[in-house]
Amino acid sequence: MNLKSLTLKNFRAYETETKIEFDQLTTIIGKNDIGKSTILEALEIFFNNQTVKIDSSDSNIHSVSKDVEIICEFTEFPDVISIDTSSPTNLKDEFLLSKENTLVIKKKIDCSKKNPSIEIFIVANHPTEKGVSNLLELKENELQAIIKSKSLNSKLKGNPTMRKAIWNSVSDLKLEEIEIPVSKPKEDTKRIWEQIDAYLPFFALFQSDRSSSDSDNEVQDPMKVAIAAAMSEVQKEINDIQQKVKEKAEEIASNTHKALQEIDKSLANKLDPKFNPPTPAKWNGLFSIKLDTDDGIPLNKRGSGVRRMILVSFFKAEAERRLKSSTKQNIIYAIEEPETAQHPNNQKILIESFKSLANESDCQIILTTHSPGLASELPIESLRFIFKNDNDELKIDLGDVVFPKIAKTLGVTPDSRVKILFCVEGPTDVDAICCLSNAMKIKYPELPDLRNDERIAFVLMGGSTLKHWVNHNYLKELGKPEFHLYDNDVTTYQNSIDKVNNREDNSQGQLTQKLEIESYLHSDAIKIGFDIDIEVHDQHNADGKATPKIFAEAYSKKIGLSNIIRDKNAKKFLAEKAFPNMTAEMIEERDQNNEVKGWFEKINELLN
């Protein structure tokens, strides 16, 4: 399941109901002590209540009420819920989804007690018509009685089937969004909640304010997540073990009952074993990992920067592992101020690891930061800005309105050295073009070095970062010329290029003559980077496939993946390990019209 949103009410600084939306990568930005960490800790309480536990002091100090609400909304929930093997069902048929067809789970916490109590509800657009509003709580014989009383043409077996027949017999179910209690459920409500609870994402919180003991969470948390991820991949074997234990326990119970009957038949008519298998958390708790570094020095005895680098290594390794894995268990990584105690180069490694993980459909990354350096490198669509309005209420903004607020709050300003804006589609285009520029400059020293020339700033027209947005929008007011280069694979791009060329500010634009930037690669550069032989085509090949797709298929086959990697990841890999191998000679062999050299000559013209 994917986390879509979190709503807080009366929790710490969030007195009034406040909602925050999440994407695959979400970055929460704001001043110190504004409520960023509170969001992550609310999620920890919702999912685990372990690293951070709910406390009687967690209700808002200005509120009379001591009731706290933490509400999570999910998408991509299971298609089928198996509460009755003879009658499968789903959340929609059981009227357990919201009006927006999302799964909403509310946890109400009574903080008036020393040890706060938690009640759990599903908030759903559910029938409220008298006689059909409580069907999930009814036993099989009670549902059968309703079927018979209404003379319905339905099987008298399978609770989901009978509920559906009863609901279908009512002309107006009077659907309303109501709270359905599941913390102390009855009948199928209990079974459904057990199914939902098992599908909830694994939530891992990495806090910035750490202790430094042998059991330091900074070290242990990544390893605990690694154990949980490993356990998810051997779930079938675990189920097999549990089934064997169940069968053996039932056999022993049966033998015990037979022996008991031989002693005294009046003692017990039956012995019915109720098998409760261990929860995933209990299985995970069976294992622990201790990490020592060079010469057997425990990791917690090393400096804070080294300890925090465990996170860098963990995220980098996990991104690569999940790319090769078929595991479908969703994981949410929540990292508070990942820039803490890290060199800027390590921060960049972290950011790239976060982006790679967020590209995987079963991973979500949530960050908090007030570092302008980190925030400026993150995608605009990931940003959430927390601030207080004129009524001193906490608000969370996203979208275009956040850019000037974040820029002002964090001090992200345009670079006055920039003279030219180089506008491309995405980050892999930047890496590829910089590699081509570097190769050509070695042979033609007069050409610009796009990677290191401070007069040139790249602007990503799709999925831009805050830094590029700030440079683009502020410098636009100064009338800086722009050079636009887009792939030739989208016909509507020509209209955009025409508009750029019709300006009167010396801006220029071109479409690539080949299909896309990857079409300029030399097959030898791919061979060097991946030991893979593929033919690079100027356009699509005979099967209608472009270079990234051809590479994705060959690469996936080489490393033994059952599923082909996404084109987006293929482009990333080519930008990182193939384009750096390009030489001027390779470029000119693939580009006999000198188109690539012409791009860089245009940049020189604009600079001069």
Image (cartoon, rainbow, N blue to C red):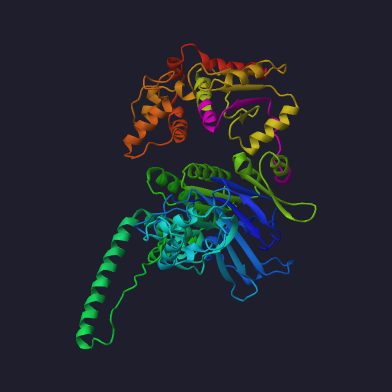
Percent of width and height locating residue 576: 46, 33
User: Quick one: which residue is furthest to the right in this view?
Assistant: 390
Percent of width and height locating residue 184: 51, 70
Q: How many numbered tags mark residues here?
A: 0
Judge from the rendering whether residue 301 lies leftward or rightward of residue 528; answer left or right. right
Give the quadrant of residue 324: top left
Answer whether residue 216 is magenta in the image: no
Judge from the rendering whether residue 8 lies leftward or rightward of residue 521; answer left or right. right
Is residue 346 positioned above or below 481 on the image?
below
Q: Residue at horizontal 69%, vertical 42%?
A: 402
User: Quick one: which residue is furthest to the top in this view?
Assistant: 593
Answer whether residue 428 is magenta in the image: yes
Q: Which residues are magenta?
A: 408-433
Is any part of residue 88 visible from this angle? yes
Is residue 418 positioned above or below 184 on the image?
above
Percent of width and height locating residue 307: 51, 56
Is any part of residue 210 visible from this angle? no
* 77, 597: nearer the viewer: 77
Is residue 319 positioned above or below 221 on the image?
above
Is residue 443 positioned above or below 458 on the image?
above
* 13, 179: nearer the viewer: 179
* 122, 176: nearer the viewer: 176
Percent of width and height locating residue 329: 43, 52
Give the quadrant of residue 294: bottom left
Q: Which quadrant is the C terminus positioned in?
A: top right
